[in-house]
Structures are given as C-alpha cells and as structure tokens.
Image: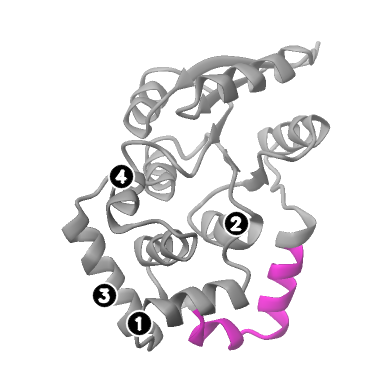
Amino acid sequence: MTKTINVLVVDDHSLIRKGLKQILDDTSDIRVTGEAETGQEAIRMAREHKYDIALLDITLPDKYGIDVLRQLRLQRPDMPVLILSMHPDEQYAMRSIKAGASGYMNKQSAPSQLVTAIRQVAGGKKYISGVLAEQLVNELSEPGKQDVSHQILSNREYQTLCLMASGKSLSEMADVMSLSAKTVSVYRARMLEKMGFRNNADAIRYAVNNHLID
C-alpha cells in the first residue's frame, strides 16, 4: 500500500491554500493535513503535529519566509520544505536552497509539476527547475563570479533591493517585510553601501539588468 504524504501548506491567501488542496486531493497518495496563514502558526503546527513535507510561501504577513524556513529546519530537520512562491526563480531560489529548502517552485508551475516535486522531495530528493539548475551550473563553472554581485547581501538587504526595484514605497516595503520603516531604511542604506550604489536609481538599474524583478 502506498504511504500517504501529509502536507503542511503555509500561505496567507486562503484561495491559494484551497487551490493547492484541490490539486493534491485529486492524487491517491498526497493529502493536505495542515494549513497555516502565518510563519508563527506554521512553526507552532510543525512543532505540535507530524508532517511529511511543508509547502512554504516566501512572502508571509508576520515573518520573512527564509527565516521561517530556517526555524522549521532547526525544529524539524526530518521534514523537507518545498518553497512555493510567486517570485521568479532568479529572485529567491538559490537563497532558499542555501537556507535549507529541498526545492523551489513558482506558483504558476503546472499542477503536475507540483505533484512530482512533492513526491520527489518527500522521498528525500531535491527538486530544482531548469532555471535553478542553470544557476547552479553557472556558480560551479564560475565560482568567483557571484562573490562581487548581489550574493554578498543578507537576505533582508536582498529583499529590500527587490522590493525597491519593483516600485514599492518605503511604507509598502515595511508592510511586506513586517518591519518598521526605520528598520527598512537601515537595510536600504546597508544594501546601497555594500553594492557601491550612489542612489536608488543605481540599485533599480542593477536589479533590472540582472533580472531580479519580473
């Protein structure tokens, strides 16, 4: 008899959670047995219940997805985490994998890909898209190339760069990051200094040229 894969879905949008549940309930071996709207709720549920895999969104209302990922990995090292995000692979895939994710998928991927990814990750393997595979090959073939790019930024500084380049105001960035505007300003200043940018326009130009935004 095939073992059922119990899934914890972490996403603040109820329609997304409902859609994922419908897709997965159509399979014979995958069931959504837990749903969380926030990072804190996900951490609590993973502590109190056993899941075979977590589907985690990067953008949550209370905590940064990468931070939630790290806490889940510390708390439940036996539970693989598959990042399911609206952001393109170029933005957060590598950072997610380096932070301990077992895979990264865009929400626009076909349902069949999601099912395949869940089975693969639940079976102890990694799941990577063609775009991410290309990034990994590039890093291996040119290991020094990334050292002087946006890879030197912390996750928060990188998030600030992407949000700013996508046209978010300081207050909007603060809302998305669940931080105060003052704290976001500090991250922005650090990002500009580390990257050697003179102003926001330089940062936006860099993000566009390096395909960090849609």
Q: Where is residue 7 in the image (x, y as percent from the top left)?
A: 59, 22
Measuring from the top left, give residue 133's x and y in whole percent: 75, 62
- The residue singled out by tag 3 in the image is 189
- Callout 3, which amino acid? Ala
**Residue 91 in the image: x percent, y percent?**
57, 60
Residue 132: horizontal and vertical position, in percent? 70, 60
Which is in the foreground here, disc 3 or disc 1?
A: 1
Q: Which of marks 4 and 2 is nearer the N terminus?
A: 2
Identify the residue at horizontal 75%, vertical 61% (top origin): 131
Separation (CA) of disc 3 from disc 1: 9 Å
Q: Which residue is identified by label 2?
A: 93
**CA separation in Å, label 4 and label 3:** 18 Å
Q: Circle 3 sits in a helix, a strand or a loop, which is it? A: helix
How far is disc 1 from disc 2 in space, using C-alphas? Answer: 27 Å
Q: Which amino acid does label 4 sit on?
A: Asp
Q: In this view, does 99 lie to the left or right of 136?
A: left
Q: Which of marks 1 and 2 is nearer the N terminus?
A: 2
State the mark number for residue 175. Answer: 4
Q: Is mark 1 on a helix, strand or loop?
A: loop
Direction from residue 161 to residue 25 in the image, left or right = right
Magenta highlight range: 133-149
In which quadrant of the rendered image does the C terminus lie?
bottom right
Figure check: 197 above or below 123: below
For disc 2, the neighbor class at 10 Å (few under 14, some 14 to 19, many from 20) is: many
Which residue is denoted by mark 1 in the rendering? 199
Amino acid type at mark 1? Asn
